[in-house]
Amino acid sequence: MPTNTPPNFLVKSTGKVVDTSIAIEATYAKLQADGSIWVTGINGSDLTFVRFNTNGSLDVSYSDDGMTTLSLKNTDPYHTSVFTQGNGKILVTGHGSNFSVMRYNPDGTRDNSFSGDGEVTTRVSFGGGYEYALDIAVQTDGKILVAGRTGGYENGQSFPHYFGLVRYNTNGTLDTHFSGDGKLTTAIEDGADGYAVTVQADGKILVAGEATILTSANNASNPAYPSFALVRYNANGSLDTRFSGDGKIITNVGTDDGGRAITVQSDGKILVAGNSDGNVAVVRYNANGTLDTSFSGDGKVITDLGGDDRTDSVTVQADGKILLTGSSDGHFALVRYNANGSLDTSFGGTHTLNSSANYADNKPAVVLDSSASIFDAELNAQGHYAGASVTLARHNGANSQDVFSGSGKLSFSANNAVLAGVTVGTVSNSAGKLTITFNNNASQARVDALLSSISYQNTAHTSAIVKIDWRFDDGNTGTGGALAALGFTEVSINAPVLKTPTVIKYTDTPLNDSFKVITGTLHTSQVDNKPLTYSIVDSYPADGDIIKSNFETYGILALNEKTGAYSFTPNAEAINGLGTDKSVRFTVTVTDGLLTGSTKIILNITQHGATESKGNDTSAGTSGDDVLNGYAGNDSLAGKNGDDILWGGADNDILLGNAGDDNLFGGAGKDVLYGNDGNDTLNAGGGDGFFANSYSDSLYGGNGNDKLVGDGGKDRLLGGDGNDTLIGRSGDSLSGGNGNDSLTIIDYEGYSVLTGGLGKDTFISDWWTISKITDFTPIDDTLQLNNAYFTVLDAGQLAARHFIIGSKALDSDDYLIYNKNTGALFYDADGIGGTAPDKITTLGVHLALTYADFVVV
């Protein structure tokens, strides 16, 4: 009989799995005795452990979702590789100017028996440049091998790249039996980076990575691209010259290639996995270094996962199948090949279970999963599923409150399962447990139709989330014993239902501009006498049980979390004469602590703009906290003392906040705003969050720590004395004045000029460019760049290796280039690559700029 293979709830298997729910960089994969796949990955400063079934689906029996996370203590925020030792201790390599290795106890604390404090750093080369430890392996004697890259750019000088390799004793000291001092570098052609290391059974050491060969044809428009590189060393660190003659191999796979992971098969053949032109790639070598042509015909395989793909680890299963972990567009990915290099189409695919359903009390039964299906290779091949069975019951034990039935064309009659008039098996259905055993009529199509027609009711009359486990047993159709597939469906029972509230109607009464508050109460149904909590999507806590919606154009919705009572308070935009009706929607929710329901509160505003005040008004406040609204017309508003709110409205207005902490909104028109004394907020537009005002306004902060916001025109913002915040757009002129100011520009079209003034100022680019900064002072001032646009820069203080003074990039890490002769600052996303640099801004000439003047957020 053939070997029995396991069934699974997967369809359309492709050999590839891309899971967008798992955000880790997988660096280590280990196969367990039962065939399941254990993956260790990096997520910031945390380690994530993920377990997959043999078919590539998440093993939800492990920690309910297949994943656990271990937070590492006293560590840097980014790591490059992780290795779990047999004793449970965890070795991690990290970024830095030197090789860095840390060891942690199983609970995530530093292991102080390793180098005294749990960390060791090693300078590998005698030259300059940043060094990166990128992979780690442990020999059978416990000694630790770390491979990576040496060389690169440092302090304005470029150094050649070499493979770097270090061997440590188990306590973290350098092993001087290795290469004399425990460390070595290997030059390969015109530059090489080591990414992966492993040890053969005979003690020889393999390091894989990438190497570049330059030719006379290479230039800025025709750069040289790397290829796979493989080096084998003897156990003492010397090159193994019996391997390809000199111990080194370079292999072209596509155009832009690089090895990222390595392993050795039991027959001595060597697998190197990596990337090729944005896809994953695998190369298999014979033990002597020649390409193994029994693998995909030429020893090479390229697989497209559909995005920007990368490989992190490679391992070989006991059956010879090859498993890769990696990512595609940042999402976790698995790929499995057969031993000959073809994709294993029994692996991966779409899981038809692990879904959810909703059941309402005293309502008809609901289908558990309308897409449920099963596949078993042996049963499918014989044409029927006779002898196989499926069982459904509550997780951790059957419960009589769970009632199963058939729906659609499926019915249970006299202990038989009948589908469209055909008996496909027998049924046992009692005490919350359903078992269907199939007969010869149960074809693949009928089994799938039956599984997708099983329905569910619950008799508890209460709110709950019930997890129903599915188990499919194949009845053993081959050697090796019976095998099973597992899945589940989560059923939400009796979520509270919010009744649709009455539409809020706000009418702006002619010539009666008042902030009328409208109130109401949310009502629910299907409640089981449990305390309810109400909420607004996109809100913040206010006072006590009250929450409020975040900034909305026409007003604020407040809601009592306990009672559901709400109130809507309009703002000036709701009472301004806009002359058109508006509609706003707030999403509100209710939960009983277990399940949640939601609906929308609709606000309709009826405007009467034709009858609104349109004169040229002159208004003055009192010594209190005043609200003055000019509406249409050329108005003059003065707040006097107190914390005042001044609305200019349409046309050309003059607003004076005077003493107090004032809020001034210019509105449409060419306005002039003076904050004067106090910590004021000046907004050139109408305060509605949109940049609709195309007029040129002037904003003067005066004394105090002010906030000035420009708009769509060519605005002039002057902060004055104090630590001010200025925010402008294309065409605006921002001047901070005295104090430590923050100047932000969204410079879509250019033509903006920023002047910090005296003090330690921060210039913030919320777009690609700032036209000009007139008085940037190194050490005192800071230029802040947005990581959303400057994507190759890591968040935080700019790394020294990414900044260069000159006219062009000299290294692949040269991302920010300052031309001291012209004052221009450029961004080069690929360093010495083929893409031309983009100009960010113009600073002063011959400034003593350093990397420390830049921050990435």
Image (cartoon, grey):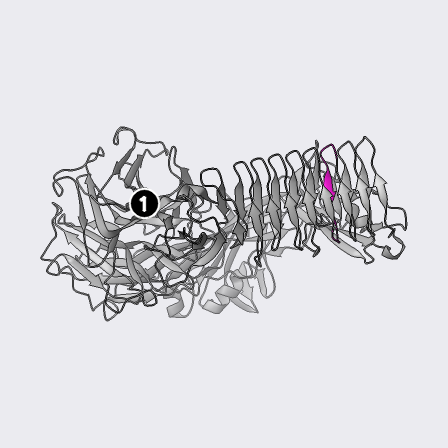
Q: Mark 1 = which residue? A: 155
Residue 413 position within the rendered picture, expressed as x and y whole percent measured from the top left: 58, 61
For the record, the magenta segment spans 658-670
602 up-or-down from 704: above or below: below
Residue visible at 24% across and 71% down?
Answer: 297
Residue 724 position within the rendered picture, expressed as x and y whole percent measured from the top left: 61, 38
Judging depth in this view, the residue of 335 and 709 nearest the camera is 709
| 149 displayed left or right of 499 | left
Residue visible at 32% across and 52% down?
Answer: 35
Q: Is residue 200 magenta?
A: no
Element class at badge 1? loop
**Any part of residue 63 in sight:** no
Residue 815 position within the rendered picture, expressed as x and y whole percent measured from the top left: 39, 53
Give the quadrant of the N terminus: bottom left
Judging depth in this view, the residue of 428 and 831 nearest the camera is 831
Residue 406 position within the rendered picture, expressed as x and y whole percent measured from the top left: 58, 59
| 81 displayed left or right of 614 | left
| 545 displayed left or right of 234 | right
65 up-or-down from 369: above or below: above
What amino acid does circle 1 point to? Asn
Residue visible at 57% across and 69% down?
Answer: 420
Q: Residues within 10 Å of mark 1 (few under 14, many from 20)?
A: some
Magenta-drawn stretch, dominant element (helix, strand or loop): loop
34 up-or-down from 212: above or below: above
